[in-house]
Amino acid sequence: LSKSNIQDLEDRVLDKSKSNFIVAVEGNIGSGKTTLLQHFEDVPFCELIDEPLHKWTNVYGYNALAMLYQDPQRWSFAFNMYALLTRVEMHSRPHKPSRPVKMLERSLYSTRYCFVQNDFVSKTINSFEFFTFDQWFNFVVKTGNAHVDLIVYLRASPENCYERLKKRSRKEEAGVPMELIQSLHNLYDDWLLKKKFPIPAPVLLLDADYDLDTMKTMFNSKREEILCGYS
Ligand code: DGT
């Protein structure tokens, strides 16, 4: 984005959103959420809060993400409880005065409706663990610590997500099976398209199956919608 573009964008976005605004970027593993966040990194009125991956790979010296994929039965519950904590931190971090738009990589909602739901259905967590997480989730939502104003859903085919995942070859994700990508894809659709779970904010659906350049052009043309929900 050029400097004059950004100034123009700032005037229009801030005029429309009127106050602080929280955007959650959602989508499967490998759908391109990081690319979207990076695309807006020069926008001075927007604060980017990416996924706390560095925290998950070093929890008091434990690589929790690696443990999760090595033994999901043993570690899913602990991982998701820790994810709940780090996500609440993302949601509730105060807006910086000069940055009224906050853009989050995922939200507490996808931890619950996609990851934890998948763990419960595939039996990597049991009913007691599921209800414990769910009670915490409900409490956090009820007490206003998971607010979002807009969800941007990057929807890519499971095959593309899996390809990208293989290509970037994060060592912790070496054991991620295609079944997980497929299941998360279905759960994202259940939640954000079929509305089988509560949707906390309006959804902007973006087709994320295109190559990088095309995605960047799309992000540019939709920049106002992405940053404040209006074009
Ligand atoms: P991107 O840019 O769309 O490819 O997204 P990434 O890969 O930068 O980030 P993402 O969303 O794939 O998350 C990193 C890893 O953390 C991935 O292996 C999935 C896992 N993960 C993220 N959130 C949760 C969660 O809430 N629960 C569980 N169990 N795993 C999670």
Image (cartoon, rainbow, N blue to C red):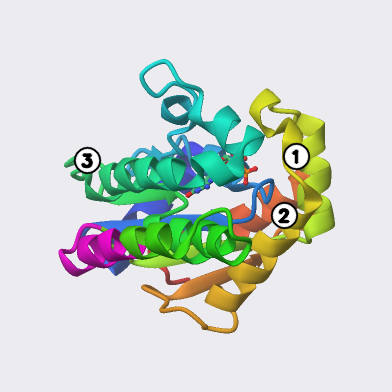
Asked whether 140 falls inside the magenta stretch, the response is yes
Q: Please name whichever residue, 92 or 71, is drawn nearer the observer in this view of the structure.
A: 71
Q: Is mark 1 within 8 Å of ligand 1?
A: yes
Instruction: Please name the residue that numbered disc 2 is placed on.
Output: 181
172 vs 204, left or right, is right
| Residue 42 drawn at (x, y percent) | 46, 35
In the picture, the disc for residue 98 is 3
Kindly report the secondary structure that dominates the magenta region of the rendered protein. Answer: helix
| Residue 32 drawn at (x, y percent) | 65, 47
Specify the amino acid type for callout 3: Ser
Q: Earlier in the sequence, mark 1 or mark 2?
A: 1
| Residue 165 drawn at (x, y percent) | 75, 39
Instruction: Please name the residue that numbered disc 1 is placed on.
Output: 165
Q: Look at the picture and state if 144 lies above or below 94.
A: below
How far, Cα to Cα, is label 3 from label 2? Answer: 38 Å
Q: Earlier in the sequence, mark 3 or mark 2?
A: 3
How far, Cα to Cα, is label 1 from label 2? Answer: 10 Å
Q: Are marks 3 and 2 in contact (CB under 8 Å)?
A: no
Foreground label between 1 and 3? 1
Quadrant housing the N terminus: top right
Q: Which residues are magenta?
A: 134-145
Q: Are marks 1 and 2 in contact (CB under 8 Å)?
A: yes
